[in-house]
């Protein structure tokens, strides 16, 4: 049987991208010099049988990422979006759905009730609801929903800075494989999803890989921007039957390029995510 459900990694970078505005770190200088733009982390879900696709998170790179899906699935319908939370890299691309841009009609927007309330209470996002550009559908922790007959989605609320909304990770399941997507979390100690007993050989975990070490941002208080360190993530989740892929990389992260840190990760069987990677779930 031909593979029909495809998940595509549309971006890899943390919310502010690579290169980041006003930054002259080695990664950003190199990215500018070679024209590298890995885009902010996002997923595309394509059902080739139903000729439909969905996006997970609407990033500042939304136009490029939408076009990538249109080219991978010519003629398919843009059927909806799923949002993880209200930090800048995960929802601000919604602006392209509104009156000044696509002026799309009633596209399904799966998100939490707190996310919907945030959009409704703040301009310019409120206009997307009042003008009928998006049609919110509530997600709840542990309650599955379907994108199509072949794709089920299970939301997991995760601990992450909640200045505006709550935050979710998602388990995507097809007939053959599963993929877990968790781009943002404060600590793996707060994760309720049981990777060990849920993900099997051939499944994939796309996990928060923001920082390799606490020394990456010496001018910032890292306690104010908590993320698990890559070293902790690898020690917990590497060398399992499922595949571990690191995403949501901060612009300062040394694993963007070759070096001892990346060599160590690769030696543990871990993959650094790359835009365009794809997995078949059915």
Image: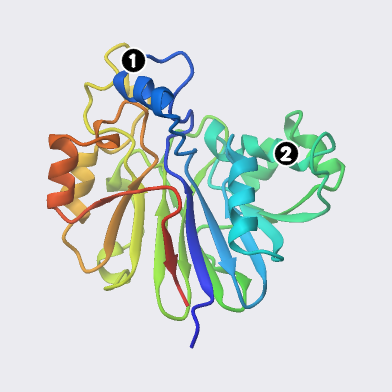
Residue 153 vs residue 166, the one in the foreground: 153
Q: Residue 129, image x and y in percent? A: 80, 43
> CA separation, marks 1 and 2?
32 Å
Q: Which mark is residue 96?
A: 2
Identity of the residue drawn at 59% across and 34% down: 60
Secondary structure beneath disc 1?
loop
Answer left or right for 66 relative to 135: left
In this rendering, is residue 118 above or below 183? above
Q: Is residue 243 left or right of residue 31?
A: left
Residue 89 seen: yes
The reply to whether dot 1 and dot 2 touch (C-beta < 8 Å) is no
Mark 2: few/some/many CA within 10 Å (<14, 14-19, 20+): some
**Res. 220 mark:** 1
Q: Tag 2 or tag 1, which sits nearer the N-term? A: 2
Between 28 and 128, the one nearer to me in the picture: 28
Residue at 14% across / 43% down in the picture?
A: 263
Vertical comparison of 264 with 155: above or below: above
Query: What is the residue that sits farthest to the right in this orientation?
Result: 131
Residue 155: in sight, yes or no? no
> What is the secondary structure assignment of the residue under circle 2?
helix
- In the displayed structure, does residue 213 sit left or right of residue 5? left
In the rendered structure, find residue 129 and report the number of the disc placed on it. Answer: none
Q: Nearer the viewer, mark 1 or mark 2?
A: 2
Coordinates of residue 260 in the picture (x, y in percent): 12, 36
Quadrant in which residue 59 is drawn: top right
């Amino acid at each position: 049987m031909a593979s029909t459900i495809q998940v595509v990694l549309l971006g890899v970078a943390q919310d502010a991208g690579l290169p980041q505005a006003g930054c002259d770190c080695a990664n950003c200088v190199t990215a500018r010099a070679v024209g590298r733009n890995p885009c902010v982390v996002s997923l595309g879900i394509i059902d080739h049988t139903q000729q439909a696709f969905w996006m997970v998170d609407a990033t500042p790179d939304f136009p490029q990422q939408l076009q990538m899906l249109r080219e991978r699935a010519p003629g398919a319908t843009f059927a909806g979006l799923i949002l993880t939370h209200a930090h800048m890299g995960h929802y601000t691309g919604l602006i392209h759905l509104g009156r000044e841009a696509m002026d799309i009609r009633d596209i399904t927007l799966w998100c939490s009730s707190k996310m919907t309330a945030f959009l409704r209470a703040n301009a310019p996002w409120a206009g997307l609801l009042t003008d009928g550009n998006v049609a919110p559908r509530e997600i709840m922790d542990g309650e599955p929903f379907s994108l199509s007959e072949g794709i089920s989605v299970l939301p997991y609320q995760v601990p992450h800075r909640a200045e505006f909304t709550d935050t979710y990770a998602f388990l995507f399941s097809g007939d053959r494989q599963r993929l877990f997507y968790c781009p943002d979390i404060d600590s793996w100690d707060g994760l309720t999803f049981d990777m060990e007993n849920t993900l099997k050989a051939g499944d994939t975990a796309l996990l928060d890989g923001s920082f390799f070490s606490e020394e990456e941002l010496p001018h910032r208080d890292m306690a104010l921007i908590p993320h698990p360190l890559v070293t902790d993530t690898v020690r917990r989740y590497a060398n399992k039957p499922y595949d571990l892929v690191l995403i949501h990389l901060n612009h300062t992260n040394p694993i963007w390029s070759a070096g001892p840190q990346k060599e160590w990760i690769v030696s543990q069987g871990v993959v650094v995510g790359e835009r365009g990677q794809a997995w078949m779930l059915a």
